[in-house]
Image (cartoon, rainbow, N blue to C red):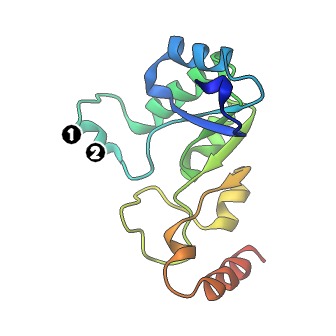
Amino acid sequence: ALKDLNINYLTVHISSGLEALKQVKKVSGKTKIVGVTTLTSLDNQDLKSIGHKRPLKEIVMIQAKLASKAKLDAIVCSPLEVKFVRKFFKKEIITPGIRISSKFNDQKRVMSPKSAFKQGSDWLVMGRDLTNGNIKSNFKKLSDHLS
């Protein structure tokens, strides 16, 4: 079904495994396949509670290596992990968990836009900090954060 879609990017969870990632990449055509690592709403304690024995940083490192091995086009990871993910994944890095306010909401691994770019993020994902309240004012705050 993927080959019939006219889309630029498609996300797939890296936790689906190497074989699944390779198969998606194989049929992707012009669509860029983006591997999602560990969600930014999770921390070490959350991972432990769902059965993971390894620390978060190690899990994300393993996921980055899988994404690279599967030749994915981009990866999604927390801005806190960008620097060490770059060692294993050389293509685009997309970072959610970007905040211009002090409200983290459900996010646990966050960073300001300017700091995320300094870490090496190629793309930022922002939601509530831009869409909640006055959008024009929020974009002004974002602009101030980046200058």
| Residue that mark 2 sits on | 46
x and y, in percent, of residue 103 in the image: 42, 75
Which residue is label 1 attached to? 49
Q: Quadrant of the C terminus?
A: bottom right
Q: Compared to 33, does 147 lie above or below?
A: below
The residue that appears at 60% across and 51% down in the rendered structure is: 95
Circles 1 and 2, Cβ within 8 Å, touching? The answer is yes
Question: Across the whole image, how many numbered discs are drawn on residues?
Answer: 2
Q: What residue occupies the far top of the structure in this picture?
A: 19
SS at badge 2? helix
Q: Amino acid at mark 1?
A: Ser
Q: Is 81 located above or below residue 88 in the figure? A: below
Q: Residue at x 60, y 57 (%)?
A: 125
| Label at residue 144 | none
| Residue drawn where x is 46% and y is 31% of the image | 58
Q: Position of residue 108 (x, y in %)?
A: 40, 58
Label 1 SS? helix
* Distance from the alpha carbon under mark 1 to that under mark 2: 5 Å
